[in-house]
C-alpha cells in the first residue's frame, strides 16, 4: 500500500495542481490582460466542467442492474430539494451524505 | 479585519471540515494514515482531486495517469486564476500563495468583492485564503484520526463529494441565464461515459467540450451580429 510510488503520486498531483493554479499569474500577471478567447473559456468552461464532475462522481453507478442507481439519484434529489429550500451548503451536504450512508450500510432498507 | 474575515469564511469552515473529514476517513480506509492526510491537504489542497487521489493511491496507478486526471479535474482552476488577475494585481509577494489557494470555495468568496472599508485588500484576501486552507487541513486530519479510531462505519461517506458538486452546479445554474455550457458539460460527459466507459471518458469529454464551446461561441457571435 504505502510505498515510494505513493509519495511520487502525491508529488505529481500536487505539482500539476499548483502549476494549473499559478500558470495564469506567470502568463498574464505582468500584462494584466488576456485574449478574448481565453476569457470566453474562463467565463464558460467552469460551468461545463462542474457538469462533467457530477457525471464523474456517478461513473461507477450501474443503472441497468439492482439497485439501478436509485440510492444515488434519491440522495441527489434530496440535496437539490434541501438546497433550494434553505440555500445552506453544509445542511445540503450533510443531509444527502447521511441518507446515502444509511442506505449503503443497510441494503435491506429498500 | 480578522473578525470580518472569520465571519465571511464561516460557511466554508462548515463545508471544508465536513468534506475534509470525509476525505480523511476515505484515505484511512484505503490504507493511508494521518501523515498522508496532512501532507495532501497542505500541498495538494484541492477537495475533489484529493478524493480522486485517495482512489488513485489505493489502485497504485501510473504517474502519467495521475497527472492526466489531475489536469482534467483541476483545469477549471486555471480559469479562476485568469479572472482574478485584476483583483490580485496589487498583491505583491502574496500573489503566489493567493493563486495557489484558489479553490472553488475561496474563488467564490473573493469573487463577491465586499472588502470592508479601510481594510488592506491584500491582507484581507490573504487572510480569507489562509483561513480556508486551515479549515481544510483541520478537517482532513480530524477525519483521518476518526477513521483510524474506527469511531463509526464510514461506508458511503464519499457521497459528500457528489453532494458538493451538485450544489455548485445548482448555484451556477441559478446564477446564470445561459445554460448552454452547463448542459453541454452534463450531456457530453454522459455520452462519452456511455461510449468510452468510466476509465477513459474524461479525455474525449474534455476535447469535445472545448470544441463544443468554441462552436457555441461562434453561434453566439453570429446571433449578436444579426
Image: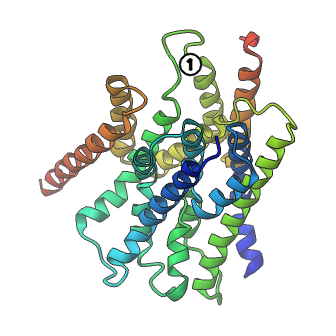
> Does dot 1 land on a helix, a strand or a loop?
loop
The quarter in which the N terminus of chain B is drawn is bottom right
Q: Name the residue under label 1.
A: A69
Residue at 50% across / 80% down in the picture? B95
Residue A11 in view, yes or no: yes
Of the pair B141 and A82, the residue shown nearer to us = B141
Say whether residue B100 is left or right of residue B224. right
Say whether residue B125 is left or right of residue B65. right
Of the pair A15 and B48, the residue shown nearer to us = A15
Q: Is residue B19 above or below residue B154?
A: below
Residue B167 in view, yes or no: no
On the image, the x and y values in percent for residue B61 come to 48, 40
Of the pair B89 and A13, the residue shown nearer to us = A13
Residue at 59% across / 65% down in the picture? B109
Host chain of mark 1: A
Residue at 48% across / 29% down in the picture? A59
On the image, the x and y values in percent for residue A82 come to 68, 37
On the image, the x and y values in percent for residue A45 come to 36, 52
Amino acid at each position: 500500500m504505502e510505498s515510494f510510488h505513493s509519495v511520487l503520486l502525491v508529488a505529481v498531483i500536487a505539482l500539476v495542481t499548483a502549476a494549473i493554479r499559478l500558470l495564469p499569474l506567470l502568463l498574464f500577471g505582468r500584462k494584466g490582460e488576456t485574449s478574448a478567447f481565453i476569457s470566453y473559456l474562463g467565463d464558460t468552461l467552469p460551468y461545463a466542467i462542474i457538469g462533467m464532475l457530477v457525471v464523474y462522481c456517478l461513473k461507477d453507478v450501474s443503472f441497468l442492474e439492482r439497485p439501478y442507481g436509485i440510492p444515488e439519484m434519491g440522495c441527489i434529489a434530496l440535496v437539490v430539494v434541501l438546497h433550494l429550500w434553505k440555500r445552506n451548503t453544509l445542511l445540503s451536504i450533510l443531509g444527502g451524505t447521511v441518507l446515502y450512508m444509511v442506505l449503503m450500510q443497510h441494503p435491506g432498507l429498500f | 479585519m480578522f473578525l470580518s474575515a472569520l465571519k465571511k469564511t464561516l460557511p466554508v469552515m462548515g463545508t471544508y471540515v465536513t468534506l475534509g473529514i470525509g476525505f480523511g476517513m476515505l484515505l484511512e480506509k484505503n490504507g493511508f494514515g494521518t501523515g498522508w492526510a496532512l501532507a495532501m491537504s497542505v500541498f495538494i489542497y484541492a477537495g475533489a482531486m484529493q478524493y480522486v487521489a485517495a482512489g488513485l493511491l489505493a489502485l497504485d496507478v501510473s504517474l502519467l495517469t495521475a497527472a492526466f486526471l489531475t489536469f482534467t479535474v483541476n483545469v477549471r482552476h486555471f480559469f479562476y486564476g485568469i479572472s482574478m488577475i485584476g483583483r490580485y494585481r496589487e498583491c505583491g509577494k502574496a500573489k503566489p500563495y493567493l493563486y495557489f489557494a484558489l479553490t472553488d470555495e475561496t474563488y467564490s468568496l473573493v469573487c463577491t468583492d465586499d472588502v470592508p472599508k479601510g481594510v488592506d485588500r491584500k491582507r484581507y484576501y490573504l487572510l480569507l485564503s489562509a483561513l480556508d486552507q486551515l479549515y481544510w487541513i483541520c478537517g482532513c486530519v480530524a477525519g483521518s484520526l476518526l477513521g483510524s479510531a474506527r469511531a463509526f462505519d464510514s461506508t458511503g461517506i464519499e457521497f459528500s463529494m457528489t453532494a458538493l458538486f451538485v450544489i455548485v452546479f445548482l448555484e451556477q445554474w441559478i446564477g446564470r441565464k445561459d445554460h448552454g455550457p452547463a448542459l453541454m458539460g452534463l450531456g457530453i460527459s454522459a455520452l462519452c461515459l456511455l461510449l468510452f466507459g468510466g476509465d477513459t471518458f474524461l479525455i474525449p469529454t474534455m476535447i469535445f467540450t472545448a470544441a463544443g464551446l468554441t462552436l457555441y461561441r461562434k453561434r453566439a457571435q453570429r446571433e449578436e451580429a444579426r
